[in-house]
Image (tube, rainbow, N blue to C red):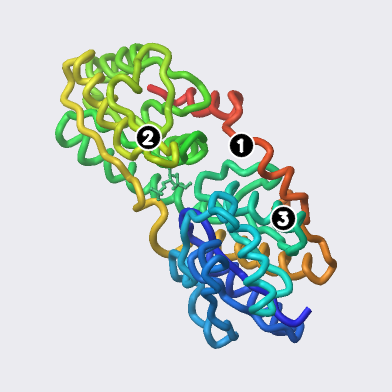
Amino acid sequence: IKKIGILTGGGDCPGLNAVIRAVVFKAIDNGWEVAGVKYGWKGMLNADTVPLTKKDVEGILPLGGTILKTSRTNPFKVEGGAEKVIENAKKMGIDCLVAVGGEDTLGVANKLTKMGFACVGVPKTIDNDLGATDYTFGYQTAVQIASDAMDRLHTTAKSHDRVIVCEVMGRHAGWMTTDAGMSASAHWIFIPEVKGSVDECCKMLKARYERGDRYGIIAVSEGALFSDFDVEAASRETDAFGHVKLGGVAKALAKEIEKRTGLETREVVLGHTQRGGSPLAYDRVLGTRLGYKAVEMIEKGQFAMMASLRGEKVEAVPIEEAVKELKTVPEGYYKVSKTFFN
Ligand code: F6P
């Protein structure tokens, strides 16, 4: 091996720069060159790369986002795209590639390896919904941001005798909402995995007000499902990628709670705030360990594999295992958070 590439694809996530830095350091120590591919797979389609040295990645650990930029481009959705990626890799002398991303980005890496272009994967998503790894980096930071925001909502809600509905990202997984809600003592948590009852939540809120606890914080996943409320009809929309549009659930739920209880209710949408800013130490360390492992995997020829956290160890697992099904919140995990709905 003479030269490897690294790209970051999909939504950004705190800790991406830690992975890039680790890959650059370890690869250069191996005597390899590193090409930083710009804008995810789009950069492979356009042969858009920059050489990366240790100097280039100095001081990037505290930075949020990705110095390589990102996009949601999938070469398999572009005519002749996969062939173009392979052709460009040959032209640029890139022997193999580290793809840092979620389900979509890793799926591409897996397919390209089968077509002859060797790739390894590093799992990334604030949603924590990738299989075959205990945690994805960026998750802890995003949960902390949501938890801090909910702490703040408690004091303003209490001052005004209000209910505040706080919408948390996570797409079809309720990990962030459950953990942030538990951490910030939300009075009710709605997630996609377990259909929640708006009526039960309203009863709880009324009981709170009657006993003198005249405010309420409701954490809701952007993809939450309900047993007695048709949120789709109320306002949830999806975009061209089939992703739920931010804000729809919070708005609809706040309106519904106000209607059913008569209590003054506001909504807050955390949105991209959850993905921005400096990663926590945990995510910097996890990103570093995964990046280091990715280079080790290349050394050993473990392609179409992904660096994964298993307990205290970082191991190589087949990408196929990670992308075959979403890792969602088990009922037993959510049940613990329900103890504190009060
Ligand atoms: O997958 C990460 C994530 O932040 C989800 O939680 C959210 O639904 C989505 O990305 C938002 O995507 P975009 O940045 O394209 O609006």
The disc, 1 or 3, on the residue closer to the chain's N-terminal end is 3
Determine which of the numbered discs, if any, sits on residue 214 in the image: none
State if disc 1 and disc 2 touch (CB < 8 Å): no
Amino acid type, residue under disc 3 in the picture: Met
Q: Residue at x 66, y 43 (%)?
A: 323
> Is residue 62 positioned above or below 146 on the image?
below
The disc, 3 or 2, on the residue closer to the chain's N-terminal end is 2
The disc, 2 or 1, on the residue closer to the chain's N-terminal end is 2
Q: Nearer the viewer, residue 13 or 184?
A: 13
Give the residue at mark 1. 326
Q: Nearer the viewer, residue 240 or 209?
A: 240
Mark 3, ligand 1, within 8 Å: the answer is no
Q: Which of the 4 image quarters holds residue 99? A: bottom right
Please state the horizontal and vertical placement of residue 237, each as a whole percent of the image: 33, 32
Image-based side of 75 in relation to 240, left or right:
right
Give the residue at mark 2. 238
The crowding category of the residue bearing disc 2, from other C-alpha atoms within 10 Å (few below 14, some 14 to 19, many at least 20), is few
Q: Secondary structure at mark 2?
A: loop
Give the residue at mark 3. 306
Please state the horizontal and vertical placement of residue 28, each as a whole percent of the image: 69, 84
Please state the horizontal and vertical placement of residue 304, each as a whole percent of the image: 75, 56
